Image (spheres, grey):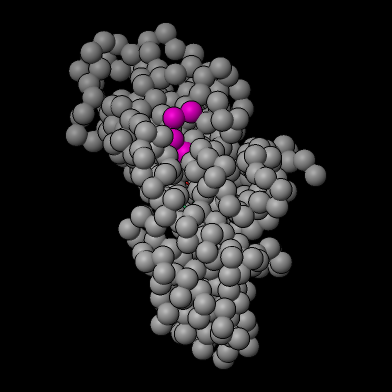
Amino acid sequence: MTQPIGRATAIVDLGAIQHNCSRLAAELGDGVELCAVVKADGYGHGAPECAAAAVLGGATRLGVAAATEAFELRQRFSDVPILVLGALTGAEVDVALMAGAEITVWRPGFAEFVSDRAESLGVVPRIHVKHDSGMGRLGERDGAAVLELADRIAADDGLELHGLWTHFATADEPDSDYFAEQLARFSAVAAEARERWPEICVHAANSAAALRSVDAHFDMVRCGIAIYGLDPMNDDPVPHDLRPALSLRSWVADVKRFEPGDSAGYGRRWTAEQPTNVAVIPIGYGDGVRRGLTNKGEVLIRGRRYPLVGTVSMDNLTADVGLETEVEPGDEVVLIGRDGTERILAEDLARRLETINYEITCGISARVPRVHDRSGLEH
Ligand SMILES: Cc1ncc(COP(=O)(O)O)c(C=O)c1O
């Protein structure tokens, strides 16, 4: 049994991230690049550390949502291309340009604005034009308008036309035909763009699409969830040879005897029906363990699974560890991860909470220190 490090700790196995990236990169054709998506602090895993492990695993580019994310990463990675996938305000454009980031554009007015700002800052940014092929969010819907905009960017000496991309709405839904529809729509625009600008970097696939169809790989795939060893289909990452990188741990601060009628936590939402012992574990929704797990979740202690009982509060939760228990104060508690032969996946929690694994790891709060385990990295 390992000793607890602190009240709540997320341990991130960087070797797993390196492995997941090499495994994804191995599926790509010659010259197809892997962009590691490390937005939202690397889906809660710690962006710079995960980006470094991803690069060791074969990622050649990084993707983020925000200018500040690009700026922070640029302090660590002087020459890895960083693409901002999201929308930028005027002020954020300057931050992205100063970070030497690549910028996404889908409106002519915004292209002109970026060109003007870039001229004042003395830089020529790489631009990726975004086609909304069916996600219904950011991007230009009309294929002809996408190509017209790319033309204008190519003709602007202050900008470098570098990429063309789209994003799938249903790549993680194997039964949906919409993925094929979007792919067909985007492929037509991409074919025309490649004809006009043979060097353009065409990209579309997120993790689900990268695993699902080689036709969606184009010149680069943008993988987020899979690099962290999480299953894009929210099921089980292991059959995809993905290794979950993050484990969330706490410890047993106390074990107390409960008699029938004794209750645990706010609102008395659980009452012992028979004599038992309850472990008090100092982690709660203030750390990102959702209150929805009240009377629903499980934890692992000494390699055994125990049910959460009573209300998950901000800083504590409680588990029924049984009458004849070996659990003692000081024991380590696993909320996500492995303990002996047992495991709790982020996907398990997501299903219980009717959400997706992305939200589970992104939701681990800033109060929880991320400890990066480099022991599995191969150089
Ligand atoms: C535009 C874009 N590309 C790629 C990704 C990576 O997706 P995934 O984490 O499903 O691989 C995201 C994440 O949401 C995204 O917004």
Q: Quadrant of residue 27?
A: top right
Please provide percent x and percent y for residue 307: 36, 21
Tell whether 337 sits left or right of 30.
left
Q: Quadrant of residue 266?
A: top left
Please provide percent x and percent y for residue 238: 55, 27
Q: Residue at x 47, y 61 (%)?
A: 189
Tell whether 10 sits left or right of 282.
right
Res. 312 visible in picture: no
Tell me the chief SS of the magenta region.
Answer: loop
**288 above or below 94?**
above
For this rendering, which residue is in front, 49 or 103? 103
Q: Quadrant of residue 26?
A: top right
Please provide percent x and percent y for residue 176: 35, 38
Range drawn in magenta: 232-236
**37 above or below 284?**
below
Q: Quadrant of the N terminus?
A: top right
Please provide percent x and percent y for residue 352: 33, 30
Residue lying furthest bottom? 120
Q: Quadrant of the C terminus?
A: top right
**201 above or below 258?**
below
Q: Residue at x 41, y 34 (%)?
A: 174
For this rendering, which residue is in front, 305 or 360? 360
